[in-house]
Image (cartoon, rainbow, N blue to C red):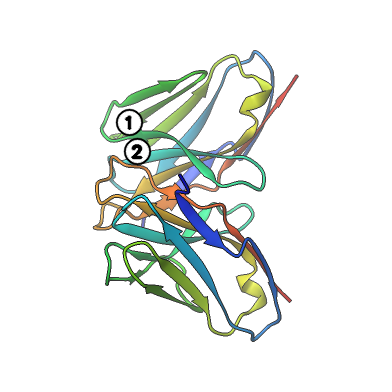
Amino acid sequence: NAGVTQTPKFQVLKTGQSMTLQCAQDMNHNSMYWYRQDPGMGLRLIYYSASEGTTDKGEVPNGYNVSRLNKREFSLRLESAAPSQTSVYFCASGGIYSNQPQHFGDGTRLSIL
Amino acid sequence: ELKVEQNPLFLSMQEGKNYTIYCNYSTTSDRLYWYRQDPGKSLESLFVLLSNGAVKQEGRLMASLDTKARLSTLHITAAVHDLSATYFCAVDRGEYGNKLVFGAGTILRVKS
């Protein structure tokens, strides 16, 4: 019962480097989400995908791109990393009905020097 | 724009005591979620509240929702050390896609 799996768990980048965070879910959920968590600010939505083939911006999309590869996988890409993107990134998935809570992965701890 | 405020942001309490965490939000919504996060870990769903007057209880935790007051409470009864964690409320924006806005979180420390 893997649930939501994120890779990598930790990453250190230099300013200007690019990388892709991977997320996969095995719960057959339609919706998937990327959040970032910063101290004292809770979680903020970066991008989401309500269904396979669709993506849309959340609260803080600047500097990120996403790809919904199929129903299971949703990736987040940093094209040119900046120190302000140092954060913990969480992927979540959920059903289309709001009576189902979103399920979160273990997070990726990303530091940009 | 939906804003979600939690208070207190930090709570230190003795074992056996009761306390309440408050979650206020700024625009109409009737869907609210509570999550727990242990240090360095993922978020775990605690409660899903879907209508005015909804009340859910699990062990020493009880959550309620008043949509007219735009307020949810998480009440802790007879706290134990294992409840030490960060608690988040999250409110559904009411748009397609079940998008959530999170509060800043309440760090709870239960002292034995």
Q: Position of residue A58 (x, y in %)?
A: 39, 66
Query: Dividing the picture into quarters, in which one does residue A113 lie?
Result: bottom right
Q: Position of residue A20 (x, y in %)?
A: 53, 75
Q: Residue A70, relative to residue B84: is it above or below?
A: below
Which residue: 56% across, 47% down?
Answer: B42
Relative to the observer, which residue lies in front, B17 or A69? A69
Q: Amino acid at mark 2?
A: Arg
Relative to the observer, which residue lies in front, A2 or A43? A2
Q: Position of residue B63 (x, y in %)?
A: 42, 27
Q: Chain of mark 2?
A: B
Query: Dividing the picture into quarters, in which one does residue A33 lie?
Result: bottom left
User: Is the C-beta separation of discs 2 and 1 under 8 Å?
Assistant: yes
Judge whether residue A51 can be spotted in this image: yes
On whether disc 2 and disc 1 are found on a single subunit, the reply is yes
Which residue was labeled with disc 1? B66
Q: Residue A2, relative to residue B13: is it above or below?
A: below
Q: Tell me how far mark 2 sits from mark 1, CA to CA.
A: 6 Å
